[in-house]
Image (tube, rainbow, N blue to C red):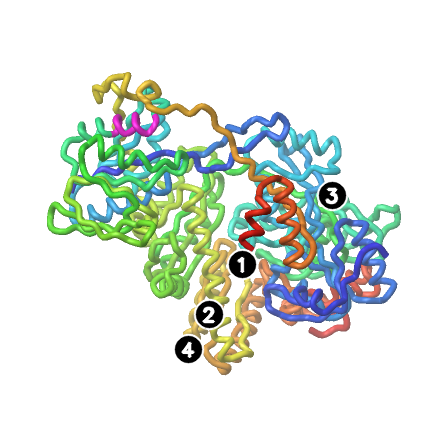
Amino acid sequence: MRLQLHTQADEIQPFLTDESSAAGRAEGIFFPQNEEEIREALKFCRENRKPVTIQGARTGITGGAVPSGGLLINLSRCSRALGMGWDEESQRFTLTVQPGMLFSQVQKGLAEKEFNTEGWSAESLRAYRRFGTAGRWHFPADITETSASIGGMLSTNASGAKSYLDGPMRAHVLGLRALLMDGRALVLRRGGQTARDGGFRLRLEDGSAIEGQLPGYRMPRVKNASGYSVAPDMDLLDLFIGAEGTLGVVTEITIALAPLPKLSWGILTFFEEPALALRYVQALKAIQGAHRPAAIEYFDRACLEMIHREQVETHAHLGLPLLPPAEAVYAEFRHPDQEEMDLCLHQTAGLLENAGANPAETWLAVTPQDLDKLIGFRHAVPESINRIIADRKREFPTLTKLGTDMAVPDDKLEWVLGLYTESIRALGLEGLKFGHIGDNHLHVNILPRSELEYQAGKALVLDWARQVIAAGGTVSAEHGIGKLKTAQLLAMYGEQAVAEMRALKRCFDPQGLLNPGNMFTLEGGA
Amino acid sequence: MEIVVCLKQVPASTRVRLNPATNTIVREGVELMLNPFDAYALEEALRLKENFGGQVTVLSMGIPSAEGILRQALGLGADRAVLLSDKRFAGADTLATARTLAAAVRKLGTVDLLLCGRQAVDGDTAQVGPSLAQKLDIPHLSAVRRVRLLGNRELLCEKMSDEGCLKIRLGLPALLTVVKEINTPRFLNLQGYLQSLRAQVEIWTADDLQLDPARIGLEGSATWVVSTAAADRRKTGKDIPGSPEEAAASILAALRQKGWSKPEREESRG
């Protein structure tokens, strides 16, 4: 075999974790650079009956890339752009990349109009030349952690603040190439192969086919990253998006690009009371059409107080004015011209005044530099939480982050905010709420100060999950299930549905070697 | 206190993009922004006004689109905005710019304090502020990181220097150029922004300033840019294998081969 299998402990060690801090074990690791080498690595795993875990940039926080034995295939060296296209019908460029290319690398290449074009086809080079003079373009999928890989984003159907307007990763994937565990390749294009009445026959590159039944569960009607995305007549491309690597190894991804919006402005608005912030959020959510916000994000008073404390005590967050102790809502707007933006801002001023906020005390970012500061603030909230947890872990080593990723239907938003607030208060816990309120999707974090509080917090999160499921919500709206939330997935869909998920996986990977333990255990149970 | 803040519009990116097909500079979509150092000068002026009263006037020399940064300053709390815009101002070096700004400051009337950013991020000369003070015959301090008002007509300033910090008293009127350590600029707010849409930005030409055309713009400049070139920042890195000692020896050998180092001197030092 030409591809090297690294088996030294110090070579494997750095790749046993992801950002969830869960730690796994593995006997060896491959670093393939192209599809041929991935095929070679899979062959080795198959012939030696080794389970294999596929890794991208390991930025996930549910342990999807953490191995539980067997071998690792790390795709960080599959990081090239493979070609570009121009789609006449939709009047947009497309980019085909290897799965290990990072989101930040894609955006940088697009911003600087510079890709390594070695080996590109004549058609790709034509599109690239056209792209060179075609103004500014970007990849409109939005994520908070920009060091994520495109393959990871696809496998988790990643999303971020601006997914409120642009949708999650799924909305931006036009096609993929993947290898199944047995080495056969498949090519999927948007609109190419579809299921019929819950059954599917997926043609592979070599002319053979895989047939099977899709799980029959109903997806919640909310932003969702829990379990396979299924529908009776679905586009089979969607089956691979968000499958957490359980069906095949994606080797090429074609994504849709979009012209960079001419104006992207953000407003951070402060409120005295959560109810007033919610009134403003509901008004923003009611906006449809051209003035619809790109993002609506919420931060409770505890978040602002935490950042304020760091600003005063450690001079952290330089460049950001001192935050007031208040509830805050961030809204971002995009418009092709100034006149539209100004109209939109007049409208927004009215909305926030109706909700009791003072337009003179808002923070308005009108330049990319100021926008970066507000985005930096948003990013600082989870990072500060991680620092606090890390500090407390020194005293209570068993502590882990207790954060949620649940989303509820529109009419349950007020209820769920009240649920979180009241139950945290009733138990006397320290908790913070922030996140994608436009999608009724909040990250609630509990910061335990003792082992007792940690246990109480854990029980509370499970209780919330039960109530959110009963209200038609999801246990994971964007982080995915990975290996850490399998019990919650089971609670959400039930044993029958998870058995159907297992059966689906067996159609593609009969021996259960590929990414075992992601979403569900192969043996049953949670 | 009557404060004037000088603002400059600069390109938002220092990176020159080339069209991969034609190797020519991509000019479309080049964004302009307020010179970052000037934002600190404006913030300091607004704080002084809030604490001690008075009026803040923002002043810029530039193309008509520079009205944008002046309007932004009005939205942030400046009271009056003046744009010096005239084809005859074009191509000015720092000397001709300072002459033009000085004429505008004189036309404004009584001014107690002039604030400028330490330098503009496009030209990076840091000359216009001090030169403007010289033209107006008032004292100036550069690289100021703290300002306190002593009584009515005197400032106590902290000026950054290579050795640390100098505390200097100076009488008004005076000109200060400020560094980014001086404050954290505020964000625009929605009310200020919406009000600024209706605000007036005054446009002054060379005629308004009664300036001799031979003393302004390219013609009045003492220096001319002969050519400009973008530095090639592409990394052409190379892996150098071996232990640190071996790697150091290979680097030294490579440098010697290129004639970048003198063996005798290096060895006599060792």
- Chain letter of disc 4 in the image: A
Amino acid carrying mark 2 in the image: Ile
- Chain letter of disc 3 in the image: A
Residue A388: image tag: 2
Q: Are marks 3 and 1 on the same chain?
A: yes
Amino acid carrying mark 4 in the image: Gly
Coordinates of residue B17 in the picture (x, y in percent): 54, 33
Coordinates of residue A30 in the picture (x, y in percent): 76, 59
Classify 10 Å Cα crowding around label 1: few (below 14), some (14-19), many (20 and above): some
Which residue is the site of mark 1?
A409
- Spatial CA distance of label 3 from label 1 is 31 Å
User: Eyeballing the image, is A77 above or below A347?
Assistant: below
Coordinates of residue A129 in the picture (x, y in percent): 65, 29
Residue A429: image tag: none
**Residue A7 occupies which quadrant of the picture?**
bottom right
| Pointers 4 and 1 in contact (C-beta within 8 Å) | no
Residue A428: image tag: 4
Which badge, 2 or 1, comes first in the chain's sequence? 2
Which badge, 3 or 2, comes first in the chain's sequence? 3
For label 2, the SS is helix
